[in-house]
Image (cartoon, rainbow, N blue to C red):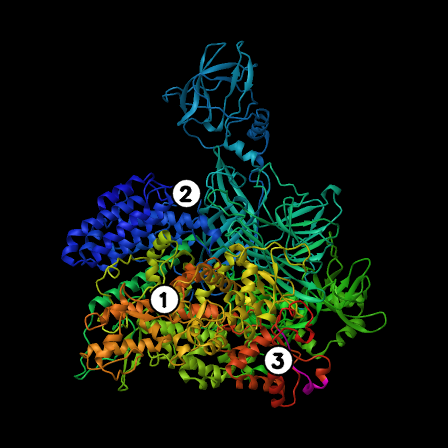
Amino acid sequence: GAGALASVLSGATGAETLDEPDETEAGSDPQAAAWVTTLVMSVLASEAPAVRVNCAETVVRLFRGWSTGLQSPSAPLKLWSGTVLNSLVLGSVAAGADDPVAGLLLSSIPPAAAAAADLGVIGMRDRVAMFALRRTWDELPNLPTASRFLLCLVELLSTFQVLAMKAGAPGPLSIPWDKIMWDPRVPRCPLALPSPPLASSSAVRELEDGVVLSDGAGSWELWSGVVSQANPSPDLVGSRSGWSSHREMRRAEGHEEVLPLVPGCHVMRRVRDPAPPPTGGRGEGEQGQVSGGDGGESPAPPPAPASAEVGIVEEVVTLGGVPGAGRRVRWLKTLQHEVVRWGAGGEYDVVQVQLDDKLDVVKTFPTPETELDIAAKYRFAQDHYFGVLLRFRAHTPDPEGVEALEGTLEWPDFLATTRVRGHRRPDGTVVIREEELLAGSRDSDWAPRFGTNAWQPGTVFELGIRVPPTSNGDDKASPVGGFSVPERGLHGTYTKDVVLDGHSIAVTGRASLCKDRLFSFDRHCCASCIAVSEDGAAATGCDGDRRDHRGVVFGTVGFSSGVHYWEVRVEVADHGSVFIGVAEKAKPGSSKQKRLSRWQGWGFVNYRATLHGSTERVYGEHFQANDTIGVRLDMDHGRVSFYLDGMKYGEHIVSDLGPAFDGIAANRARLQPRTLWPVIGLRRPMDRVVVTKKWVSNAGIHPVTWLTDALALTTVAIRTGQGETAAASAAPPRPATGGKSTPIALPHRRHNHNQSDHVPDWLYEDAWRLWGRWRESRWLRIATRGCTAAEDSFTPSTVDVDTSPRACAAASARTGLRVPLLSGDRVKILRTGGRILDQPEEAAVLGAFRGLLWYRVESQRGEAASLEGASRPWCWTTSDIEGLELVRRSPATPPEIEPRLRDHRLSRAPEFWSGWLQSVFDQGAIVRDGIEIDSSDSLGEVHRHQVVLALERRLNSSGIVRFLVLFKTSEGTWVRGWISERIRGSVDVLIVKRIPDAEARACAGEENCSELLAQLTDVERADMDADRGLLEDMDPAAWSEDTAIDRITSDWERRLVAACGPRAEEWLAKGHGAGQGDAGPQDSRSFRTLAEARTLKDGAGRHGRVAWSIDADEQLCQTVQQWSDLLGVTPGNLVFAHLHAILQAGGGGASAVVQGLRRDWAEHVADCVRSKPLLSGASPDELLARAAVLLALNARAQRALPLVSFSLPEDDWDEEHQGVPSLASVSPRGLPGAKSAVPPSTAAAAAWRPQSVGRHLRRIKMLLFTHTKRQFWDAVLQATMTPTPLAHDEYEDPREIKTIKINRVRATPQRLATIRLVSERLRSSVFGQLHRELRSLPRSAFRRAYVGKGHGGQRRAFKVKFLGEGVNDYGGPYRAVFDQVADEVRSDRLALSNAVEAGGETALKERSCLIPIFVPCPNRSAGLGANQDKFLLLPGLPPAHIRELAGFLGKTVGLAVRHGLQMGLDLPSLVWKPLAGQALTIHDLEAVDSLTSRTIQRIAEHYQSGGSSSVGSDGGADEAGDEDWRRELNFTTVLSDGTSVSLSPDGAQQAVDESNWQDFVRALVACRLQESLPMLHALRTGLASVLPVDLFPMFSPEELEQLVCGSGDVDVDLLQQCTEYEEVSPDAPHIRFFWEVLREMRGEEREAFLRFVWARSRMPSAATDFPMNFKLQAPQGPAETSPDQWLPHAQTCFFSLSLPAYTTKEILREKLLFAIKNSPNMDADVRLHSAEGWGEA
């Protein structure tokens, strides 16, 4: 059979490559072949080892047959082959070499690669790695979703990697990516190439891979700018060199094709000007010496005749040692033979022609291009400007302080990236050399750089920190003199020697790179109607040519890969006059230049539309002057999206507008690479836009990183599975209790051993490096505006900000602040973009990155608070600090240091210094009250030649230099205001200039200057003195901004320590990388010793160290997740210092050690450890070291999850055959009489369980944080969302959003309980009305997530209109529908009472709920046991229309999950376990049916005791004796709905006795556990149409229940943590009364309160899952003056409560409960009983 199967599989093979699967069907049936394989392996699994020896050859033949099928071009066969091969190999690896089948299978695969056939394990692994790499690159735009073929390739790669490790490969991360055959379409990864060690052990892997941006050790620096290449050799451009003649000749010969010159072709002698001999070196065939065909002839070319002659080619010969570089020609007139050049030395002596019958030339053909032709064609001898992106990271410095550098240099003009190496000197000079081409074409398009199409290594760049001249020329006056305006940049030259046709040419140029801006506007690629400012930051519309009314200007830098975000400020604009986006640009030297007189590319126009070509589409919001537009270009996914930061109707709007264009690079297998450049289009004169200094850029995640992380996770899973199998087979004996040494007895679930083999060496190394960075307690990971919703872990725009006081103080100084802002400080934002906010916002300072302060807005009001991306962290620049006001310091700031921070101010960096100014503009200068010009008022005017004193220099958001000046107005009053340095517009004209002190006194007079200085305040005078004294001893020539900032920060720290003593020194030590606690491990070896074991205490109080087991790791993982949920942060952002202090102090005592730590939080954190039996004895260092291992594993898993599958082969096979996957498998664990975990040898039990990576991944899923899994889940939901086109009117709903009418008046539970007919009851219920309205919608409609304007951020797929209720759906009614559906489907109390009153048979039939989908669990019906709040799906095989209702309920639940709503369904583990892919046990039955469980237990006790005890059918003792009990107990049972079923064909007649009682118990348990299987399949089918149910096995049953149902208890502490206070103090008495009353409420009262304020009964389980914060607001109107007379007022759409200031706690309780209990409808005070809906009530 196996041989025939192998033949069948071989017959389907038509290719020898693992290429992309096509959709053609092969002649074989892979399902049948898989069924045969399963049958064979099932038989072998049940046989004895002696029998299996004879069958081992069969398995080997199966392996070979499926290996052949893997090479088939048939997609189904390829996928099935990969799945079965994985199962065979993994099963053999798990069984070990001692198993006869496994040993023969493993020995049949050569351990090493054969040189010719490449058939070994290593060779097979490398081939699969190559194809997996290419497929990952092709599917990169689709991630986090991946095709089944890619998942199969990754699983196959993991399998072969495990085999390779057995064959001697070092580990899963050791695949030689740089040596395998690389696909030319995939750019090479610099991380895959060998490199020296990094400078710090705390350089975590995410920083090395470029996934996370940071300023820490090992992170990548980004410098962007322009390279200008001048004429390489002017003396070669003249006609004597032949370049011009070549160019003219080719223009004259411009025909359509170049034909090969072979014998028999006709040629004409080329007439050309005599040229001097070449200047290159001598060699064979040079200086006119040519060789003949055999190298013996060497005739010199004769002089050209007066008239051209024609001839015929007779032979192709060798010239100059180059085969085919010459032709032997016979001239037709003279009949002489001559050897002519055809490419030798780059010259052509003849031209190919076509002759007529009279031997006249009728057509000439062009000659092939020479190197000189190519150089001339691509303007090599002309000036070029190329944008570049330089990324590098530093390695360990040598003793002289020189740092080795490695990185990449991206050339967007050439769609190429090169690898560079070099060094950085102590003075900041960077020297790098291009060494290798990583991406791009090697043999085309490089002529503008090198004069030839081939790329050449060796270009050397030498870049230094240079201070450019100021805009005032030589006038570099400042308060201390000698210092000019700083600029963070690298400037220098580069050189490269190239050889063209024997000429050695030195290519030189200049490079100017900076960090402040991602790009500037390119004046060389700009329409004539647009003017670019001197610094390239601003573009302004000018008159220009009238035909250029829609001109564009490109950015200097383009992007071909990675994720990039930048912001553009719209300075002046009219409706529809500004276009912001990206576009393609012609390649350098190309004759097909883009038209600059029209808008092009993909962009956003300020009349709420996107534009591509001539296609417009409604998108986003209107933007106007003074608004800021963010552009997010994701080249990895081919997506462009926009961000709006502006004002609308007086309200500050910050919103992620979502993707505007998608699929730009959707199919990399068929599209050429593309580079997109920032582009701005202007239509009107004086339109103006400015590129800001706020940006985030990342090179992207390379496919090698994705695959490496996937291999890391899968090999850990396989290693864990092998360890468990080995431990189970070893069966260690129980330790003896006698003797002197008693081992510690550990609690366990699966095994009795302490196993740490599941942690590989590389994971300990990752954890060691993460541990070093984590202990610094200074890094906070944030998702910036460069990240999209739910893509934080897959989008490389996350940033690690530095929270240390030193870093924040340095960023404050760089921003120009006098009083530093530190991490955790609360700041009030009074202005944005220079405009005063009507409602100030409050923000929290997060930390520093790239020299800027980063913040998160914590309190916004109105619609702005609910917009997507409103609270996403961003940064402040120098123009933003004008509207900042410190509210309060961080709780972590020591109280003795806080007042000193106000006294010890920061010195000001020279960038902000000024001095004396003189007005030089004819019309004078206007002084305004704000730094922004358009949003400030005039204070006066400075006349020409007037001298004023400038207190501060600063750039505003438009990039204009502004001075804060002190001057005397014409009225004689002293004014402080802002004045501009230059005229804003198309031409930069000076308004004021800086002058030295002596010149100022000479111009204004000594008396006037003294009078000006006398107006300074004491603080201003002290600040100026401090600024003067700071850099007095510095050499201006050695000055740089970084050195100045470092000196300012050090001086601030010195003064603070002198004032506060050791406490300040300890607090500031955080900024220098000091850890917490003791010294800790100093190397990876000592860290591993600490992390691989923990301390436990036995019952006698003795301590001992034991290895970490899987169970202990799972408990620790759960603990870390509980910590993060409690503190409202992600697991990676837990502060090491806080956790260490809490664990060291044992709880509340840590609040005295850690400043600002709440005592109750500390107690909860400690309780999380005390409640875990396997963790309670471990030390804090042991716990946190092991937590670092879990954090390192989860860091890998974040990018591994999209490329791995949790599905099982049998699930896929069942779905292929039966249309539904297998659900509700039953495990015999816990059954009475079961002696092992393996079921008895029955046909079902002996079935082969194919091994797969998914099965191993399910074993370690509890080692992944819930946050990690939820992040991936949210990203998949976002990727599978159905887009909704917007309506033209932004306040109208799209036509795809249907409005459904719901009558809740006639759907009250009391009324539904009176309806006897199920169909009528269903029609009246909210669930039935929803079903009737939505059942005809396609599946894609349920995957919509539209957010309407003013809807409070609520995602939706439809709108709701409640008949008879005066309410509009702004989110509250939509949420209320799902909440009421959950209530209806589990409403049973009224139905039960009515059924009992009817009595008899009716009572038995009415044991279901009001909606016939669920039934109360037996414990609930009987009123005993646990879980009396649970419901079960309807058992048996209900009618088709009932199953259809269950499917629709699944769609409804899926819709709620997609929209962030929790439905309180109260379902037991009998539902959640099958959905999560876990087997059911008798314990799940016991949880909902105590009577049946007790019956089973007593049956087992009776027969195991030899019949000495008796039991009745009701589970109690049978007083009638054993005989009566045996007569009534038979093979039947009663289901949860009261229906009696038979457990065997003649179950009613088959009595239970001693011989069959175990079969009865097994049949009974299986029947009861699977009684609702048809309804469960229907429910899952409905869920599958809306949600990715294949990911359900990634969660535990408890996690899945929380995902769907949320938290069943209203956590008041969590709610208080997520509360904002508007116009009311959190310390107000009535606010304290409110929280006390809420904590004193019963559970159902708190649930009713949540319905009252939010229209939902369940809360999210963590603060990070809250879609919006709860808002407590001050009352309005009469309730403000007479609070005790008014009720609280709730707005469910916005999750807010307006609470009057009640005088006593008792009044507040009374009013709040009255409002909660008497508001069943929304806006009931305006409901009209004559309105629609009430007539049916």
The answer to whether the residues at label 1 and label 2 have Cβ atoms under 8 Å apart is: no
* Disc number placed over residue 1718 in the picture, else none: 3
Amino acid at pointer 2: Glu
Q: Is residue 925 magenta?
A: no
Q: In this rendering, which labeled residue sits more in front, label 1 or label 2? A: 1
Which residue corresponds to the image point at 43% horizontal and 71% vertical from the top-left?
1405
Amino acid at pointer 3: Asn
Amino acid at pointer 1: Glu
Q: Is residue 1718 left or right of residue 1244?
A: right
Indicate the position of residue 194 as horizontal and vertical percent values: 38, 54
* Residue annotated with mark 2: 23
| Mark 3 / mark 2, whichever is N-terminal | 2
- Which range is magenta? 1681-1691
| Mark 3 / mark 1, whichever is N-terminal | 1
Indicate the position of residue 840 as horizontal and vertical percent values: 67, 72
Q: In this rendering, which labeled residue sits more in front, label 3 or label 2? A: 3
SS for callout 3? loop
SS for callout 1? loop
What separation in Å lies between label 3 and label 2 (alpha carbons)? 62 Å
* Residue annotated with mark 1: 1571
| Mark 1 / mark 2, whichever is N-terminal | 2
